[in-house]
Image (spheres, rainbow, N blue to C red):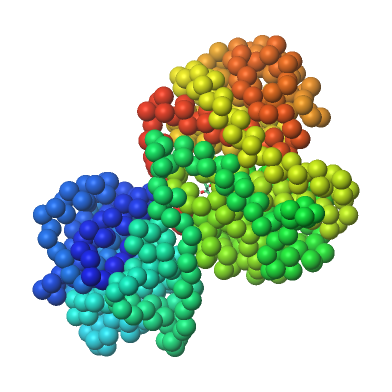
Amino acid sequence: MCGIIGYTGYRNTKTVLLNCLKRLEYRGYDSAGISINNEKSKIETIKAVGEIKILEKKAESFSANGPSGIGHSRWATHGAVTEENAHPHTSCHQEIAIIHNGIIENFKSLQEKLTQKGHIFKSNTDSEILAHLIEEHYEKTTDLKKAVEKTIQEITGSYALVAMTDKEPEKLIAARKDSPLVIGVGDNENFIASDVPAFLPYTKRVIFLEEGDIAEITKTKIQLYQSDGSKKEHEINHVTWNIEDAEKSGFTHYMLKEIYDQPESIQEALRGRISDFDYSISFPDAVEELLSQPFESVSIVACGTSYYAALLGKYLLESLTSLPVSVTYSSEYRFFGKNYAHSLVVAITQSGETLDTLAALKEARKNGASTLAITNIIGSSATRIADAYLLMQSGPEIGVAATKTFTSQIVLMALLSLCLSLRYDKIGADDFHHHVQQLKQIPRNIRKIFDTIDEIKHVAKKLSTAYSAFFIGRGLWYPLAREGALKLKEISYIHAEGFPAGELKHGPFALLTKETPVVAILHKGITYDKMLANIGEIKARGPSVIAIAEDDDEDIEKYADHVLRYPTDGEIECLIPATVILQLLSYYTALYRDCPIDKPRNLAKSVTVE
Ligand code: F6R
């Protein structure tokens, strides 16, 4: 959740740290700060509550430049949002400064011990303990790496930690457990950050730290160590994202850009997975090996939007493979999840860092399940924990509200279902080829949605005055109703709920009035008549109905007040263009309500806390 950046090199350290912090804003934050080892070999620190631009303003009078520095954007989990609680935290004599992401579980007992030894704590955070512990160990070892090593042996919990001292001003020491860290490798400069976009303007060469790694970083040297102190080789990866990928490309918000990215991101999700020659589906070797096992059931774990992709995955897998599939919120699975013999556990997580999903994955592994992660982030913790992983290949998603990664998750669930269906002999060659061919048409059908933007805006304008809204669908369209409601509530702050259409009459009907619009998402499949009947029942109670329906659906006009249309196609292939309508509807509703679309209140992009 918090953003971390460390820098050592030849540039103006203050400028680099502030630039990198701005690039981490999308993670969500409430306060921020920087510490710099200045030219007089003293650590100077500045912090501010609120936006990075407030810190930047404050830092105008802060002249500190020097060989190294660290910066942090905080999303409070322990201690109120105050300057004192913002990072970096410093030791009693200001000789050590640290930034930390994670939770130190035994900080209370450690704090008591250190207080008795005379340490004075300035904040109400668990993180500050690290600065004091390192200070204690540094006095004995006079070696920052050793002091950090000893510190992490004493703490329990999770951490991505970067420390520096004015005694070794060119050096940063980083360590990770259950929280990501990545090194940016430069020429005569190096970076350490919680995620790649932070330093993307400076370098695309990266080293992903693994669990338990400790890194010693100077401007010319990077040395990794294992937790037992032994040296470790590292591999430099080249990330292909360019700066434009991570920027808005002229769109008013990242979210809008990311909605418009979808024809390409869907193509990317399919890229390398469908043979042009015979339309067969193939995955990386590790995934193929995993899928070659004879599974008897599948469990899917995920949170938020990824959970709705999981729900959709259940419908797809069950209908295409006949395997029993359960879907559980990660936060529930980690405590109550059941593993059946010969079961595959699939974790869907855009960030690959959602703490509950990682805990669920670990639990599944512990209980002997085979595990597959579906994620957007190469090198993320999910890719390291699971037996195998499939990448969404969506490029960076900066807007807090998930859009393009959701539709890529659907594509991957469809590919996975089709692939297993063929392996289990549940689909004929013709049907299989038909579906695969149709999947390739999705980008074209999404572009057709963009041609209807004026109608979507018109309906969004009406929706923007609502206080509460319902979304309904059946079968494959029910998870879309849930996702449509989540998208609307998180960015426009309109209360919204998604239901299977048949469920409204079992309670929610009590809330239907002229003021509660209902969005009905439908397709002319087996539940179409039932959907029309449900819409009729709703209309009789006063609400206006916004239907999302196929191009050639004429009957719907008689039932709905507004109809937004997606190109007629097979059911699976229509899900994504219909999702794009829901995303645009939420986006413009939020825009008309003047909401901070890319950074909704109280939300963060990557939820690495419980
Ligand atoms: C909603 C949204 C969140 C995430 C959820 C899981 O738009 O983005 O609900 O889907 O926090 O995140 P990942 O997929 O990174 O595990």
Q: Is residue 178 left or right of residue 531?
A: left
Classify the position of the N terminus by image quarter.
bottom left
Q: Is residue 328 visible?
A: no
Nearest the viewer among 80 and 257 is 257
Which residue is painted at 66% across and 57% down in the image? 272
Residue 382 to residue 261: above or below: below
Q: Is residue 471 left or right of residue 12?
A: right
Coordinates of residue 470 in the picture (x, y in percent)? 59, 26
Nearest the viewer among 154 and 110 is 154
Q: Is residue 366 left or right of residue 152?
A: right
Which residue is painted at 46% across and 22% down in the image? 464
Residue 173 to residue 192: above or below: below
Residue farthest along the front direction in this orientation: 277
Which residue is painted at 64% across and 22% down in the image? 547
Q: Quadrant of residue 335?
A: bottom right
Which residue is painted at 44% across and 71% down in the image? 207
Nearest the viewer among 530 and 125 is 530
Coordinates of residue 238 in the picture (x, y in percent)? 47, 67
Coordinates of residue 340 in the picture (x, y in percent)? 76, 61
Q: Is residue 201 left or right of residue 122?
A: right
Coordinates of residue 145 in the picture (x, y in percent)? 32, 82
Count of labels in the image: 0
Q: Is residue 597 visible?
A: yes
